[in-house]
Structures are given as structure tokens and as C-alpha cells.
Amino acid sequence: MIEKITDPEFDWFVEEVKKKLNLDLSGYKPHRVKRRTDILLRKNRTESYRDYMKLILSDEDKKEEFLDKLTINVTEFFRNPEKWKALEKKYIPQKLKETGPRLKIWSAGCSSGEEPYTWAILLEELNASQAKVIATDIDTGVLAKAKSGIYEKRSLESTESVIVDKYFKKLDGDKYEVKPSLKTRVQFKKHNMLQEDFERDLDFISCRNVVIYFEMETKNILYQNFVDSLKPGGMLFVGSTERIFNYRKLGLKVVEPFFYQKI
């Protein structure tokens, strides 16, 4: 059983976030939300949730900081490389044979873009010319970064040097920019998974290390929506810390760790 927080001021703050920022935090784990918010209160030297709300409504940078901290944005290219290798060598070629070149892939909760651009690299490597990647996130700040396609060297730690040379342009100060061929493959847009309709007729969905921050009831709703969005035989790619315990009930089967397939 999840312990609830009894704090009227914090409850007020959560309601205001929903009304003023259009971010519904009710599905998130409450202790995580409160802990991260309290850190920001101390950092900005605000005395109360009401004062902090005034601050983020009056200062765009502070608002973006809040949204960034409340929505997880930690990622890198080819995170868990062996799983991307399985996609490149097995699952994407399999799907291309079954359904043809018009693959449709959704990177849900894409953060600053490393994941959808990783998909784009695999599609380039496999000459899947008609495949497209839709990439969504609730945070407009990280989406702007994703669209720019510029990254620090640390984001490429799991990327083979031959791939870096082929698909990235070296900039000043240990920064790299993804090449135009990748940018044209990915469509970035804002999307709230808890409130808005999902994409449909998808061959692959990746949503990694996002759902773990939601409460169980919300997780189950999201997973059901993902399944409904997949074509029969479509695959859901999740994070290393995530397991779907009721996958059979949802109409999924385990292909291997991290990968579930719609029956």
C-alpha cells in the first residue's frame, strides 16, 4: 500500500500545478513529487508552496526548471547497448519482412531526444527509408533541446565511435550535433500521456524509465493504452528497472527482458 501525504498546503500546490501549468501530478508517486518540490523550494529560498507557485508563474526559467525536475530527463544514446543491438539485428529486420518498409515507431517520454535519434540511427543503418519516428514529451524545454540535436560528449558514452563519426558533427567544446539525415526522420511534439490520446497502429513503442515514477493504477492504465496503440505483433520496449507483471492480462508476451510483444 502506498503511503499518502497529509499536507493541505502541498495538496493545494498540486491542484494549482494542474490548473495553472496543465500538469496532472496525481498519478505520480506523491513522496517523489514532494521531495523534488521541496528541494526546489530550498534552492530558490522560498518560504512556502504558495510563494514558490508565485515564483514559477512569474518566471519562465523557474517554471521550466520545475517541469524539468518533476519529469525525469536522464538518458543517453544507445542506453543498454545490447538491447539496441537486438533491435538492429533481429526485431526491426523481422518487422520489415513482415509488414514492409512503412514502420511506425513511437518514443514516448523521449526527454532530450537521445532515444528517438537512436531509433533513427538504426533505421538509417537498415536502409528503412520509409520508416518514421514520433517522439513525444510533456516538457517543452527538453523538446527544444531535442529538436536542436546538440549534445555533450557524455551522452555518447555508449555509442560506437564509427556511429559517432557517421551520424554526428563535432562542434566546439566537446559538443556534437546529429546530422540532418537523422533530424528529418524524427517528428517531435508535446504530449501528456496522462491526459491526451495515444498514437495508433504502431509497430514499436519505447517508453523507458518513465512509468516507474507513477503509481500502480496509473501504470496499468498507461500499459493498457500502449497495448491498444500497437498493431498485433507490435513490440513495447521498456526500461531496465521496469517489469510488467500483468502482461498476460494486457495481451502481451515476454520476448526477452525489456521487450514485450502484443499477441
Image (spheres, rainbow, N blue to C red):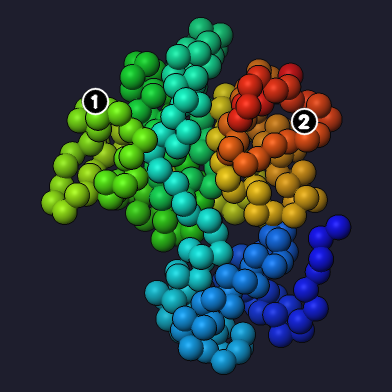
Task: Give x and y (percent) for residue 134.
Answer: 48, 37
Q: Position of residue 143 (x, y in %)?
A: 41, 53
Residue 130 appearing in the image:
no
Residue where numbered disc 1 is placed: 162
Question: Taking 196 as reference, is 7 above or below it?
Answer: below
User: Residue 3, percent across and down?
Assistant: 81, 66
User: Residue 257 got which mark?
Assistant: none
Callout 2: SS: helix
Looking at the rendered structure, the kind of residue marked 2 is Tyr
- Vertical arrangement, residue 76 with respect to residue 34, above or below: above
Task: Kindly identify the amino acid type of the residue bearing the numbered disc 1.
Answer: Val
Give the mark nearer the N terminus: 1 vs 2.
1
Quarter where residue 128 is shown: top left
Q: Position of residue 241 (x, y in %)?
A: 62, 42
| Residue at numbered disc 2 | 247
Q: Is 54 located above or below residue 112 in the figure?
A: below
Looking at the image, residue 138 lies above or below residue 86: below
Report how far apart the C-alphas of labels 1 and 2 lie in the structure. Answer: 37 Å
Q: Secondary structure at mark 1?
A: helix
Which residue corresponds to the image point at 32% horizontal and 40% vertical from the top-left?
Answer: 156
Task: From the viewer's side, name the closer residue of 23 and 29.
Answer: 29
